[in-house]
Amino acid sequence: MNDDVNPDIPSEPISQPSKTRSALDHSMRNAVRSARELAERASSAARDVAGAASETAREIAGLANETAKSVTEMASETARSAIQIASEGAQVVAQLAEDGAKVAAQIAGDTAKAASQIAKEVALQMAQAYLRKSTLTLALPESLLNKQVRQIAKRNPSVDHVAVYCGDDRLTVAVDGHQNRLVYTVELEFDVLECKISRDEQYLRVRQVDESLDAQFRQTNLVANWATRQIARGSFFMANRLPTRSPINQMLEDLPGFRREGPRLWRIDLQKSDLIELLNNRAWMVDKLLSLSDLSVLPGLTTLKDSRDLLMQLVNQFEIRDLRVRPGRLEVLVGINAG
């Protein structure tokens, strides 16, 4: 048997394993091709996705940036508004606090004024209650007494000057006057025996205890004046001791309010002589209350001394109860009518 193969003779059919391998190779090639296509598509899709994602990211980033700007602007505007509102609120609060402080201060001031006024009214009532049951002694000094007496003396054109001196229950009166060319000084001394001051009667009873006269002429030499003075003194002394109408009696009877009750005994009507007007002068009483060193002599005076109006209201109710003559002053006892 010839082992050589004839090329013209068809070969024997391919075996099953070969077909399978060929199909596998073909499938592999198709798979590789498909895989490449899929890879290219995936790559392209990935690129598209990446591009889209990048664009989206950019858009998102842009939107985020815009949003951040808007949020920042809104936050800034909100912050400015909040600061402005807070500032305006603080101003309002400060104004309210200031107005509240002013109102509180005014209320406190009004309350203090009201309390002070109430305290003064109470002090006035205390003083009035005390003076309805007791008296207060006010000293009328000699200087003020003379000031008032000289105002009264101006009504007499022949009187040039008057001086009153106070002793212990004694009054000394010196009168300077003139008559034509004659100028004179008459000095009289009185003991005060009684003082009566009520609604019905106001008088002093006095006794004349001494008198003297000094007289001279104007534009006359010294010798003539010396003689005139000696003669005047002697004549004056003798005339006032005669049981006739003496010069002193005549002079005193001519004064308003003086009435002779007996030898050298006189009754002085304080109302008719205008002396009660002098004593009842309210201004000196207020000044005296203000100048008192011991404020405890009258309840409420410590508070009343700060108000001249209330003191005047109190003083206008005073009634003179008694009068005493003391060295250098008159002591006037005052009270308030209980009725």
Image (cartoon, rainbow, N blue to C red):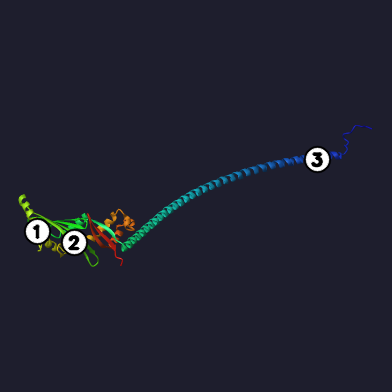
The quarter of the picture where the C terminus appears is: bottom left
Lower position in the chain sequence, tag 3 or tag 2: 3
Q: In the rendered structure, find residue 227 and report the number of the disc placed on it.
A: none
In the foreground, 98 or 145: 145
Measured in 3D between alpha carbons, the distance from the residue under mark 3 to the one under mark 2, in whole angstroms, is 174 Å
**Amino acid on which the number 2 mark rests in the picture:** Val
Give the residue pinned by disc 3: 24
Give the residue pinned by disc 2: 206
Q: Secondary structure at mark 1?
A: helix
Q: Is residue 221 visible?
A: no
Residue 329 at x, y = what percent? 23, 56
Name the mark nearer the viewer: 1 or 3: 1
Lower position in the chain sequence, tag 1 or tag 3: 3
In the foreground, 272 or 91: 272
Measured in 3D between alpha carbons, the distance from the residue under mark 1 to the one under mark 3, in whole angstroms, is 191 Å
Residue 124 at x, y = what percent? 33, 60
Left or right, residue 67 beside residue 178: right
Do callouts 3 and 2 mark residues in contact (Cβ within 8 Å)? no
Residue 175 at x, y = what percent? 14, 56
Name the mark nearer the viewer: 2 or 1: 1
In the foreground, 87 or 315: 315
**Amino acid on which the number 3 mark rests in the picture:** Leu
Residue occupying image coordinates x 71% and y 41%: 39
In the foreground, 162 or 112: 162
Residue 233 at x, y = what percent? 9, 55
Q: Toward which corner of the image does residue 165 lie, by quadrant? A: bottom left
Do callouts 1 and 3 mark residues in contact (Cβ within 8 Å)? no
The quarter of the picture where the N terminus appears is: top right
Q: Secondary structure at mark 3?
A: helix
Give the residue pinned by disc 1: 238
Residue occupying image coordinates x 8% and y 56%: 234
Measured in 3D between alpha carbons, the distance from the residue under mark 2 to the one under mark 1, in whole angstroms, is 22 Å
